[in-house]
Image: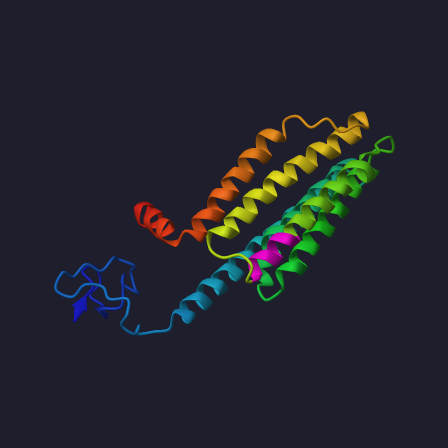
């Protein structure tokens, strides 16, 4: 039986580190054996980490609400209306939806999260566009970009959760999607500025993206080569 050198807790051979203080277990007479049954379920550890993230998310949520309220009150007191504080509140709301809400709603389907993020971003950009009556970039530029990125996000979610791609092929999908997104972005910018598509800088993104994506796709197919690289990189 092993004992932690830091706190003296009794340890099992299936434990890589002390469950109490986190010190790494190093016992040459009884090395770590991952095949042995663990003294407690790993599911409990995942639940505890999830609860800690939710608790932190709620704390940050309260702080964001307080910041928004303070900004609105300062705006009303000094300027008599809600002007700049509206953008602060909307920025905080957008950040909460995209970053914190997934932690609080872990059971929600990723497709719904992507759609919610897209709708929140569209609403935020719409308010920014309406603040300037002379601007016309929302329908011609902002909305198509958000829709393009949203569709690519939905495609990535579908492929990651399907049985079509495995392992490093998922990385390939993400890298290729980034290249396609950049080419789509330049296309929309060209149409918005010049009403004509003249692709220029996006080629320097999409060509390496497809090359890197193809490499990851081939490596996943070549199991022996993938295992050798994994061992070399220790991942």
Total number of numbered discs in the rendering: 0
Q: Quadrant of the rendered structure where residue 145 is? A: top right
Which is the main secondary structure of the residues drawn in magenta? helix
Residue drawn at (59%, 56%), measured in percent from left and top? Answer: 159
In this picture, residue 157 sits left or right of residue 142: left
- Of residues 18 and 217, the one nearer the viewer is 217
- Of residues 10 and 55, the one nearer the viewer is 10
In this picture, residue 119 sits left or right of residue 17: right
- Of residues 203 and 55, the one nearer the viewer is 203
In this picture, residue 64 sits left or right of residue 8: right
**Residue 215 locus on image (x, y percent):** 47, 43
- The answer to whether any part of residue 138 appears in the image is yes
Q: Quadrant of the rendered structure where residue 180 is? A: top right
- The answer to whether any part of residue 76 appears in the image is no
* Quadrant (top left/top right/bottom left/bottom right) for the N terminus: bottom left
Q: Is residue 176 above or below residue 111?
A: above
Q: Is residue 147 above or below residue 135?
A: below
Magenta-drawn segment = 154-162
Does the magenta segment cover residue 149?
A: no
**Residue 123 locus on image (x, y percent):** 77, 47
**Residue 116 locus on image (x, y percent):** 70, 55
Q: Is residue 222 above or below residue 191?
A: below
Residue drawn at (45%, 52%), measured in percent from left and top? Answer: 221
């Amino acid at each position: 039986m092993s004992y932690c050198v830091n706190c003296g807790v009794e340890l099992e051979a299936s434990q890589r580190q002390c469950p109490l203080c986190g010190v790494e277990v190093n016992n040459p007479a009884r090395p770590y054996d991952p095949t042995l049954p663990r003294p407690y379920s790993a599911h409990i550890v995942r639940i505890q980490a999830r609860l800690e993230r939710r608790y932190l998310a709620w704390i940050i949520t309260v702080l964001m609400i307080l910041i928004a309220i303070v900004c609105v009150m300062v705006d009303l007191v000094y300027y008599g209306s809600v002007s700049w504080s509206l953008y602060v509140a909307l920025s905080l709301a957008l950040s909460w939806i995209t970053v914190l809400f997934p932690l609080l709603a872990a059971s929600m389907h990723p497709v719904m999260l992507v759609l919610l993020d897209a709708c929140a971003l569209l609403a935020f950009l719409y308010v920014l566009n309406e603040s300037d009556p002379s601007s016309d970039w929302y329908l011609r530029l902002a909305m198509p970009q958000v829709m393009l990125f949203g569709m690519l996000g939905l495609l990535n979610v579908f492929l990651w959760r399907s049985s079509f791609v495995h392992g490093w092929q998922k990385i390939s999908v993400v890298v290729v999607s980034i290249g396609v997104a950049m080419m789509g972005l330049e296309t929309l910018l060209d149409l918005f500025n010049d009403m004509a598509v003249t692709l220029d800088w996006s080629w320097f993104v999409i060509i390496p993206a497809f090359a890197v994506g193809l490499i990851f796709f081939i490596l996943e197919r070549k199991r022996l080569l993938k295992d050798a690289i994994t061992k070399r990189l220790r991942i």
